[in-house]
Image (cartoon, rainbow, N blue to C red):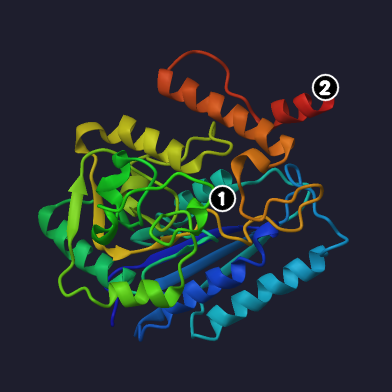
Amino acid sequence: MKLNNKYVIGTNIMWFEIEMYEDFIDGLVNLLDNDIENKDNIYVDLCLNLSQHLEKMDTNQISEDEVIDKFKSGVRKITKLGYNKVNTRIVKKNEFYFHADYRRDLNYNYCKEVDYIMWGETDSFFPKEAFTGLETLSQYTSEQGIHKFIACFGDRKMWDSSWDATVHNDYVNVQFVDDDKQHENLNQAKSPLPIETMNEINSKVEDLDIQVIDYPKLDGSCLVMSSDLIKYGVNIPPCMIYNDDHGLSIMSQKLMGQNYKQFVFKNLLKVHARRHPKKRLYILEENNPNSFEDKKNVNFLTFKNLSDQNIQMLVQNNDKKFYEYEDYIKILENK
């Protein structure tokens, strides 16, 4: 396959996700080892984040050097496929730099280099057919004069029907079961699903089912943005210190209004294993590998609360001052 467009796949990898990162790399290989003729049309941007402001590393279980070695091993698997535009960065443990910062910078830095920005996530797999789908969509949008848009792939059943517009056709009529085992239910979005199973489901596609919605319904995994959307000014606002996808959704609505367009590949399945069993490992004084919200440490919950308040200020257009990283530090010092 020869690509007519240029792409960047960018992912922020937290140090405590390093064991799950191995699965993520397997997912990238599944996407990229696809007989693409012009590999230089694809950038891969990987950021290893060693920041320890929210979570402290239990060095009795793993060291920074071991985490870095595992990260570099994954990078080598990508470069061995013949991809030369692989950019990496390591965030030091004393830096304040998180998902929202990374994705904001990714959008801004690459929107003049590529046509499409693809958000990777360590607990997620893009469908193997992603580039085929995006090239098809690009041809249609160009013919129709549509240049500012977001695209996403079908997910498994989500927790309420408001997400059905982005749920894969095979899972729309599945009943979501909200119980203690929901993260193990393969029909539901929070559970892991083998790459082979995803590939088998997607291999049945003969004609793409691409639907469009005129309102933002975003989760940050495997999200695709046209560069023109970013150039227009749609990005994660700096007041978002955590909730990157929510911030992008708000600004998309504010700036695009009734012209907002989101294309959904309803019969191309992605995997977003929000409760992956290796999502939060090696964290000092925390035993929460599946990343359950109520089991995260108090520092993280304090930080997220500040970001949630920023969201309300952004939505309500009030004149209150946004919380920043310094406010989080002051709260910890007062405690």
Image location of residue 187, percent across then percent down: 38, 59
**Element under label 1?**
helix
Q: Residue at x 83, y 55 (%)?
A: 58
**Element under label 2?**
helix
Relative to 67, 266 lies left or right? left
Image location of residue 324, percent across then percent down: 64, 29
Q: CA distance from mark 1 to mark 2?
A: 29 Å
Label 1: which residue? 102
Point out the image quarter for the C terminus.
top right
Q: Which mark is residue 209?
A: none
Which corner quadrant of the image does residue 256 belong to?
A: top left
As drawn, 315 above or below 20: above
Q: Residues within 10 Å of mark 2 (few under 14, many from 20)?
A: few
Which corner quadrant of the image does residue 260 belong to?
A: top left
Q: Which mark is residue 334?
A: 2
Relative to 262, 51 lies left or right? right
Q: Residue at x 76, y 52 (%)?
A: 283
Q: Nearer the viewer, residue 192 or 140?
A: 192
Which corner quadrant of the image does residue 13 belong to?
A: bottom right
* Residue type (three-letter) at the residue carrying disc 2: Asn
Q: Nearer the viewer, residue 206 or 289?
A: 289
**In the image, farthest residue toward the right:** 60
Q: Nearer the viewer, residue 61 or 243?
A: 61
Point out the image quarter for the N terminus.
bottom left
As drawn, 58 above or below 331: below
Q: Residues within 10 Å of mark 1 (few under 14, many from 20)?
A: some
Residue 22 is at least partly visible in this image: yes
